[in-house]
Image (cartoon, grey):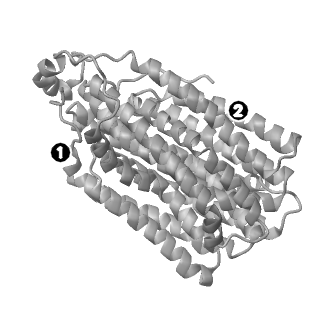
């Protein structure tokens, strides 16, 4: 892989270049993450069968919600971490990292237990077809046992990104993806473990990566020392740096606190709406899954193929939004809101370019893509559903790109009220249209609702962005030198 992986400074370098080269490893890493998830489906569909693929699909909408909760929680923590880093408060930054890890480890254990207890009830409530219920339950229960590893792996990736290091998560994701694929083939095809083998492979691969990631993070934190702001902090941040340089230069106490309730409170302010924003697609998928399930396992299999491809296609958009969030937090921490506006415009151009590429690929190659998920003898309804879904959604990825970037600015600033409202309305539109119109229009109503929700979300957040009120918000205080 020959990629310019030079590290750009978000406070001093060109906003466009620093955003692009920070987002690029995040995009590649998330693509690998989606890639091995997709390979799970392909291997199960090809070597176990259509019903097994439908069972993975019925579980996938729920498992993705939990992962998106982890990612959203990590982003909430990363906003606080990034603002401390931008302000030069490295000791507080370390405390915020430890607070995030301990808090979300506890959350993951609770969620895992709740999932194990209620997994059958959830699948039944989602109208999971009887012929795939037991396989879906088995996949889901193995997933919940390994949830703390899966959860912490995603939190650790967010922490690295908050520190301006998006390369380490990329390398770990590549390692995890390749390991997962190798174990998929061994457990599912070689040993004949079926759907259980796919679930175990995912848990083991991400568990190993989580342990490695934690060790690397501890080593990385040792390099940070409390010190004055550097002189080249950027034209917009010079006044801020000078006014607080003496304060930052004060020697810090020796000990680093492992937990701080005030920091946790600030993280929660951003984490809850971030969890909502990150999981909005997944929650929508979960709530409308019962609608899709009502059309039978063949339609579920085709819909599963389509949503797996959609999950890959939105990766550049979500990663760009997350990069904008970190960029915003660091620059507001350094007192440079004008750089955020320049970064926003650069990110919009980046999302538009991605949207055009995705549209062209899906328009011309959707049949071959859907066919890779299904056996040659699968029901025609499975192929028809997957192809119809991708043919329609191909033209609307710019909508989620604009939404993700605009939400990223508000999230990075800690301006969460309008941000939360916009995402709730997005969810409401998707669920309402699917439930009300699916009986009339058929399963197509499920994907008609998607661009409607994305666009409405974007327009609400964009009005807030234009107001400029987000630029006057900050979660931390530079005087936090205890």
Give the label, 2 or 1, closer to the camera: 2
The 10 Å Cα crowd at callout 1, few under 14, some 14 to 19, many 20 or more, is: few
The secondary structure type at the circle numbered 2 is helix
Pick the front one: 1 or 42: 42
Tag 1 or tag 2, which sits nearer the N-term? 2
Residue underneath mark 2: 178
Residue underneath mark 1: 472
Question: Marks 2/1: CA distance?
Answer: 44 Å
Q: Residue at x 84, y 51 (%)?
A: 46
Pick the front one: 281 or 257: 257
Pick the front one: 17 or 233: 233
The secondary structure type at the circle numbered 1 is helix
Pick the front one: 255 or 380: 255
Place of residue 104 in the rendered image (x, y in percent of width and height, measured from the top left)? 44, 42
Q: Which residue is drawn at 19% across and 29% down?
A: 236
Place of residue 35 in the rendered image (x, y in percent of width and height, measured from the top left)? 66, 42
Q: Which quarter of the figure has residue 277? A: bottom left
Q: Which residue lies furthest to the bottom in this view?
A: 440
Badges 2 and 1: C-beta atoms under 8 Å apart? Answer: no
């Amino acid at each position: 892989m020959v990629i310019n992986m030079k590290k750009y400074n978000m406070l001093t370098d060109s906003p466009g270049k620093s955003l692009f080269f920070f987002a690029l490893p995040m995009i590649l890493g998330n693509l690998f993450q989606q890639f091995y998830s997709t390979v799970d489906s392909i291997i199960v569909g090809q070597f176990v069968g259509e019903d097994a693929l439908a069972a993975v699909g019925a579980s996938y909408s729920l498992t993705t919600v939990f992962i998106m909760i982890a990612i959203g929680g990590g982003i909430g923590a990363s906003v606080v971490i990034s603002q401390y880093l931008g302000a030069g408060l490295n000791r507080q930054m370390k405390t915020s990292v430890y607070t995030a890890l301990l808090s979300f480890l506890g959350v993951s254990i609770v969620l895992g237990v709740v999932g194990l207890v209620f997994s059958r009830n959830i699948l039944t409530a989602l109208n999971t077809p009887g012929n795939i219920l037991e396989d879906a339950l088995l996949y889901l229960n193995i997933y919940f046992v390994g949830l703390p590893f899966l959860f912490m792996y995603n939190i650790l990736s967010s922490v690295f990104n908050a520190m301006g290091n998006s390369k380490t998560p990329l390398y770990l994701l590549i390692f995890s993806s390749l390991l997962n694929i190798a174990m998929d083939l061994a457990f599912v095809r070689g040993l004949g473990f079926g759907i259980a083998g796919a679930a175990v492979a995912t848990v083991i691969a991400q568990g190993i990566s989580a342990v490695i990631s934690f060790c690397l993070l501890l080593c990385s934190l040792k390099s940070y020392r409390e010190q004055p702001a550097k002189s080249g902090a950027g034209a917009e941040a010079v006044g801020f740096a000078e006014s607080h340089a003496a304060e930052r230069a004060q020697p810090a106490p020796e000990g680093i606190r492992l937990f701080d309730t005030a920091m946790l409170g600030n993280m929660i302010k951003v984490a809850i709406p971030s969890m909502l924003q990150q999981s909005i697609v997944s929650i929508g998928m979960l709530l409308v899954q019962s609608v899709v399930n009502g059309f039978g396992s063949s339609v579920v299999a085709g819909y599963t193929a389509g949503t797996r491809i959609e999950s890959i296609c939105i990766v550049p958009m979500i990663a760009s939004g997350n990069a904008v969030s970190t960029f915003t937090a660091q620059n507001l921490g350094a007192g440079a809101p004008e750089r955020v506006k320049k970064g926003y415009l650069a990110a919009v151009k980046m999302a538009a370019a991605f949207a055009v590429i995705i549209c062209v690929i899906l328009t011309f190659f959707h049949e071959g893509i859907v066919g890779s998920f299904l056996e040659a003898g699968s029901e025609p309804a499975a192929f028809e559903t997957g192809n119809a879904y991708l043919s329609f959604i191909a033209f609307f990825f710019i909508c989620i790109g604009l939404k993700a970037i605009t939400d990223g600015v508000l999230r990075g600033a800690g301006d969460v009220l309008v941000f939360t409202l916009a995402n709730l309305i997005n969810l409401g539109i998707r669920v309402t249209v699917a439930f009300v119109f699916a009986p009339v229009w058929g399963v197509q109503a499920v994907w008609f609702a998607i661009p409607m929700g994305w666009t409405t979300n974007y327009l609400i957040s964009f009005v807030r962005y234009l107001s400029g009120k987000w630029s006057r918000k900050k979660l931390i205080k530079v005087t936090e030198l205890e």
